[in-house]
Image (cartoon, rainbow, N blue to C red):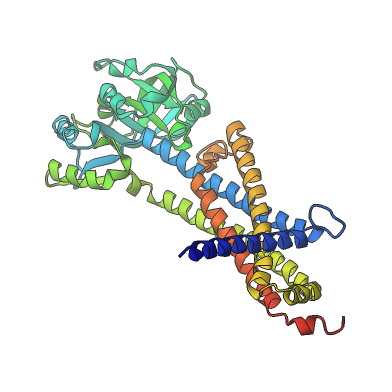
Amino acid sequence: MTSEPHSSHSSHASHSSHLGFEFWMAWRYLRARRGGPVSVITAISVIGVAAGVASLVIALAVTSGFRDVLQNSLLGATPHVMLQRLDGEGIAKWRELAATCERQPGVLAAAPAVYTELLISAGRISKGIVLKGIVPPMERRMGGLLGHLREGSAAPLEATLGPEDMPSLLLGKDLAEALRVHTGDIVTITSPRGHLSPIGPMARARPFKVAGVFESGFYEFDGQWALTSLAAAQQLLLLNDVAVAVGVRLADPDKAAEVAASLKSAAGAGYVTTTWMEQNKPLFNALRLERTVTVLTLGLIVFVAALGIFNRLYVLVLEKSKDIAVLMSMGAKRRQIGWIFRLQGLLIGAFGIGSGLVLGYSFAWAAGYYRWIHLEADVYAVNYVPFELRAGDALWITGSVLLISLLATLYPAHRASSVMPAEGLRYE
């Protein structure tokens, strides 16, 4: 009755002692012959794994950083869902439609807008821009570009315009710098929608006073967008009291597709919805593809490091065949011999992973915090390389590299456990 627990305890203790023996032998084989911490070949294998892990960490931090910065910039400056007329005509009852949208579950705010591409001039400098007409009190609730004013004020956009009054304008920081204008300066906006003359349609130009400058951090907005009042945009484009679209801000942007369906149903026939994900689908697809290609490409570094582990263990098996034969003749089991070599590969992988994670995360944090790497904003949309560190990346990198390290040990371990004691000691 009492012998079974004793037997179980003895078996557990024996297994623990075997595991300690296997670990001790694995560590002994990894060390240098003259008693140093590790052999040169082991150090090279660890460095190879560390380089692969650090490269993966940094590359994934960059792709995650670009995605997060671009997504946050887009969500902070554009509506999460856009409602427009299916026939392309303006929305005459935009006030009622905005109120209807705000009553839907998950909607925080709704605001009308007029979008159009025009030409802006300051002296001899001209640039193409996207002019957005807004209702400032409603736009503030949307959390858009009005929340990123760098100088000036949006208050002039709320003033009621008379026929002879000069409308006000807010410019993106990079656009203002390109035009060399500041708050209080006058610019001219030219619209192709003009009056008909005896020689044909004439473009219409109107002066605007710069009321302020905004900076979102996203070049597409800072370098190409300008904001004015809805009434001023309507007058410039010879529109009646209509909006081109009604934008909607959501409590949860990730649920844009579901809320868009309910908004379309509430708006009635003749309307179409577009979500922020659909508007920027090519951009996020490109980032997703870049992340996949990056992982596959840099994964080759880990694969090369795994070949180094394989080579190191295979050569070690050939060198230590006599030692293996001695151990087996002294009672070591084939399973134990195999685990001695598997543990060597896992130890190399573990040291490499630990070093790589420390190096990769340290560099990525410092480079992101101090913005070491600068970019051309008109090319990359942001003026620095963003790094976003995620714990999930470290988890799957650790698991993947440990698995690859273990796979690299399978054949050498099998070869070691297949050594016949008599063969290993034949010439001794």
Q: Nearer the viewer, residue 243 or 257?
A: 257
Which residue is located at x 33 percent, y 15 percent?
155
Q: Residue at x 33, y 49 (%)?
A: 278
Give how far across and how far down residue 357 sits, in percent.
62, 47
**In the shown orientation, is residue 164 left or right of residue 34?**
left
Q: Please say whether residue 58 is visible from this viewpoint.
A: yes
- State the image quarter where residue 379 is shown: top right
Image quarter in which the N terminus is found: bottom left
Q: Nearer the viewer, residue 103 or 422?
A: 422
Question: Residue 321 appears in which quarter of the rendering?
Answer: bottom right
Outermost residue toward the front? Answer: 1
- Compared to residue 256, the image places residue 203 above or below, namely above
Quadrant in which residue 363 is drawn? top right
Determine whether, in the image, residue 274 is placed left or right of residue 336.
Answer: left
The C terminus - image quarter: bottom right
Position in image of residue 89 (x %, y %): 19, 42
Q: Looking at the picture, tell me which residue is in the foreground, 199 or 112.
A: 112
Q: Residue 371: percent from the left, percent from the top?
A: 60, 34
